[in-house]
Image (cartoon, rainbow, N blue to C red):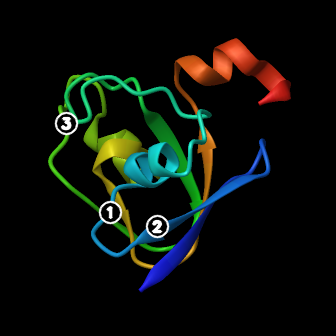
Amino acid sequence: MKFIVEIVEAGSTSTCSKGESVLASMVRSNIKRIPSGCHGGGCGVCKIRILAGQYETGKMNRNVLTIEEEREGFSLACKTFAEEDLEITVVGHMKKFYGNNL
């Protein structure tokens, strides 16, 4: 099963297989809109916000993503797994770098 993941402000999309992280799908598709660091949920560099769609998450470092942030739809792309098509926005370092030109 494949899902579409769209970075709304960039208009970039990738397909994400069930069990594949959002970050891994972007890397596989050569979409460099989400920064990556450890790929293990520890560094927080790949922070995103899910605007629409259902997803599951893996274990994430609470020093970089609080429970309250998670309740508000924030996640780490390396630990976010689509359950249906997703619309996301980048909130970490890349957002500051690209601004509205992402």
Mark 1 and mark 3 residues within 8 Å of each other at the beta carbon:
no
Mark 2 and mark 3 residues within 8 Å of each other at the beta carbon:
no
Quadrant of image for the C terminus? top right
**x, y percent for residue 65:** 31, 33
Q: Residues within 10 Å of mark 3 (few under 14, many from 20)?
A: some
Mark 1 and mark 2 residues within 8 Å of each other at the beta carbon:
yes
Mark with earlier residue (1, 3): 1
Can you identify the residue that label 3 sits on? 40
Q: Amino acid at mark 3?
A: Gly
Left or right for 79, reference 40? right
Is residue 96 placed above or below 101 in the rendered structure? above
Q: Residues within 10 Å of mark 2 (few under 14, many from 20)?
A: many
**x, y percent for residue 25:** 45, 55
Count of numbered marks: 3
Mark with earlier residue (2, 3): 2
Instruction: Tell me the residue at 32%/63% (across/down).
Output: 20
- Image quadrant in which you'd find residue 58: bottom left
Left or right for 17, reference 5? left
Q: CA distance from mark 1 to mark 3?
A: 13 Å
Quadrant of image for the N terminus? bottom left
Left or right for 35, reference 98? left
Q: Is residue 74 visible?
A: no
Left or right for 64, reference 98? left
Can you identify the residue that label 1 sits on? 20
Can you identify the residue that label 2 sits on? 16
User: Disc 3 on helix, strand or loop?
Assistant: loop
Q: Amino acid at mark 2?
A: Cys
Q: Amino acid at mark 1?
A: Glu
Q: Is residue 52 visible?
A: yes
Instruction: Tell me the residue at 68%/13% (across/down).
Output: 97
**x, y percent for residue 18:** 34, 75
